[in-house]
Image (cartoon, rainbow, N blue to C red):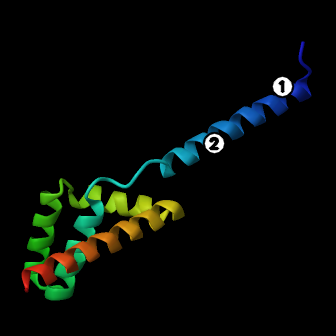
Amino acid sequence: MLSAKVKIKMGFLISFLIFVLCACQEHSGNISPNFSKAYVEMRAITEIYGTRPEANLLNKSILEKYGFTIESFSKEFEKLQKNYSMWNAFQVEVLSYVDTLQKTKSKESK
């Protein structure tokens, strides 16, 4: 039979483990496919059009092209901001996609 102190300690330990597992679960996972591409293309649109209405329409079409809604894209972005390792992986994907676009553009201009 367990003493009251041991039961309290076990209860605390179990509660703590459940908390840790739930907290880590939010930050686990990978970056959604094509998220980086959508991000890069939307940033380019914002650079070109600024806050003009055309920017909103084009950004919406980019989200649709890659299977995102404004809400799902925002949620994914928030998830990345909360996880340092995922944020770094995202930045690597962004740079890789920008490099690909630049190489494609330079090939097309030749």
Residue 98 image offset from top left, x and y in percent: 27, 76
Q: Residue beneath label 2, please?
A: 19
Does 58 sit left or right of 37 as displayed?
left
6 and 68: which is toward the camera: 68
Q: Considering the numbered disc 1 on the image, is that residue within a helix, a strand or a loop?
A: helix
- Residue at position x 52%, y 44% in the image: 25
- Quarter holding the N terminus? top right
Asked which quadrant contains residue 69, the reply is bottom left
* Position in image of residue 102 (x %, y %): 21, 80
Which label's residue is closer to the chain start, 1 or 2? 1
- Residue at x 90%, y 29% (from the top left corner): 5
Q: Residue lying furthest front in this view?
A: 110
The residue positioned 92% from the left and 21% from the top of the image is 3
Q: Position of residue 10 (x, y in %)?
A: 80, 29
**Relative to 90, 35 lies left or right:** left
Q: Please tell me which residue is depicted at 47% across the width and 67% down the height of the picture.
A: 88
- Label 2, secondary structure: give it: helix
CA separation, marks 1 and 2?
Answer: 18 Å
Looking at the rendered structure, which numbered label has been put on residue 99?
none
Q: How many marks?
A: 2
Which amino acid lies under the numbered mark 1 shown in the image of this protein?
Lys
Q: Is residue 109 shown above or below 93?
A: below
On screen, residue 77 above or below 67: below
Question: How dense is the environment of label 1, judged by Cα within 10 Å: few (below 14), some, or many (20 and up)?
Answer: few
Residue 14, by quadrant, is: top right
Mark 1 or 2: in front is 2
Which corner quadrant of the image does residue 44 belong to?
bottom left
Q: Nearer the viewer, residue 33 or 1?
A: 33
CB under 8 Å between discs 1 and 2 = no
Residue to which mark 1 is pinned? 7
What's the amino acid at mark 2? Answer: Phe
Q: Residues within 10 Å of mark 2 (few under 14, many from 20)?
A: few
